[in-house]
Image (cartoon, helix red, strand yellow):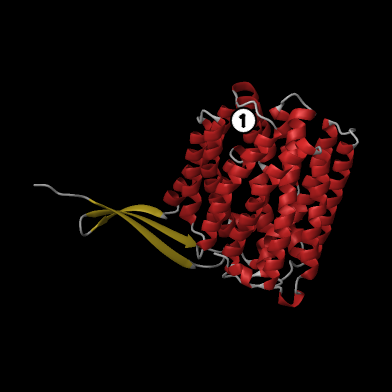
Amino acid sequence: MFRSLSGINYRLWFAGALVSNVGTWMQRTAQDWIVLTMLTDNDAVAVGITMALQLGPQLLLVPWSGLIADRFDRRKLLMLTQSLMALLGVALGVMVLFGVAELWHVYGFAFALGVVSAIDAPARQAFVSELVSEKDLPNAVALNSASFNAARLVGPAAAGVLTVAVGAGWVFLINALTFAATLLSLALLRRGQLRVAARAPREPGQLLEGFRYVAQRPDIVAIMVAVFIVGTFGLNFAIFTATMARVEFDHGAGEFGLLSSVLAIGSVTGALLSARREKPQMRVVFISAAAFGVACAISAVMPTFTTFAISLVLVGLTSITFMTTANSMVQTTTEPVMRGRVMALYMAIFVGGTPLGAPIVGAVANAFGPRWAIGVAAIAGILAAIVGLVWMVVSNDLRLRRHPTRRIRFVLSHSVRRPGDRAVAEEELAVEETVARRA
């Protein structure tokens, strides 16, 4: 489960990222809370707009952000982006502390942070492949996810307590300090042990090369469609937990932070279970999408704060299994020289749908209540699973056979194809149902 931690470089990266992720979750929680309660009158749409502004640039900048990640030294690039995000945290924290922050200020900072994050995300995703071997890459991706969600156990709860005790401004300043851990880990890496990938050449057409590569990979296209559906309408957890805590159960910032931490319990569990798998599998992507839909449906009908909180464990487990497996499938089956551009497109689809989905989900929460907003997430999970089922049938990866021994076999064949290659690998899972014959 923890085999990637055997390397010194990954250990350094993991430790720095864990500290920084705690700060990131603290800022996210405090930011959503001040928008909902201090700068508006419980307006879920405003929270959705903030999320859209912060995540939208990943969609707008995808042709450039991926190429930047493939062309430049990713370690130096990450040091720049992490420093800029720290400065933005300091600026917002000072404005909140002095009481001059208004809603449009938060919108502006969210957009600026989104622009920097758009450059940071594909570089950070692709940089993991320089820290571990190709064999350990799926494990490293899963442990990264575990780190991110382990931080969610601490960050939101700490943000809730600190927001009540000293104010949201100090939360933003503490987040800015946590970026020092990532910067220190990047500075301490043993550069001689990095597995630096070949840089993208400077030639015409490189901006669109990532799109052309993905277009030739129907398996990646199917994953990205499913990720877009779930990411757009299903992963708006800030809206779900904030509105359920405030509107449905009439609780405060502490309980809001607690819900995010409970959600992370399931997320960490799902990430660690994913880390145990030797390699990601296509069927797990779509089965976990369906399970996420069912988990959200259960969560939407929970009658009390306690039962709702407990149900979030299952929501966290299924969502992170879906996200981690999809991420690993894309990374491990993409050519190294294309990884930055493909991951930029993947991240743009993953979080770039939020500008569309978050305001819609927020409007549903305002008009019909937060339970119906979670119902939208449930529908998204089921639709993503249907996309996977249709792809497997159309690509002949799922078919019905009559076995000579009078058994019906549903055979799932998963083939990984890269441009210019024939079938690289194929594995089958046979699910048998005995057909009894009676006289």
Q: Residue furthest front?
A: 165
Q: Which residue is mark 1?
A: 244
Closer-to-camera residue (410/84): 84
Displayed quadrant of residue 341: bottom right
- Please provide percent x and percent y for residue 381: 52, 41
- Please provide percent x and percent y for residue 262: 59, 43
- Relative to 321, say whether 333 is above or below: below
Displayed quadrant of residue 32: top right
Rendered residue at 60%/37% (across/down): 233
Q: Is residue 23 visible?
A: yes
Q: Is residue 326 visible?
A: no
- Relative to 332, say whether 153 is above or below: above
Left or right: 397 with respect to 203?
left
Q: Quadrant of the N terminus?
A: bottom right
Provide the secondary structure element on which disc 1 rests.
helix
Rendered residue at 49%/56% (across/down): 282
- Please provide percent x and percent y for residue 206: 73, 60
Label 1 crowd (10 A; few <14 / some 14-19 / many >=20): many
- Please provide percent x and percent y for residue 182: 77, 60
Tally the numbered discs: 1
The amino acid type found where label 1 is placed reads Met
Q: Residue furthest top?
A: 367
Closer-to-camera residue (367/216): 367
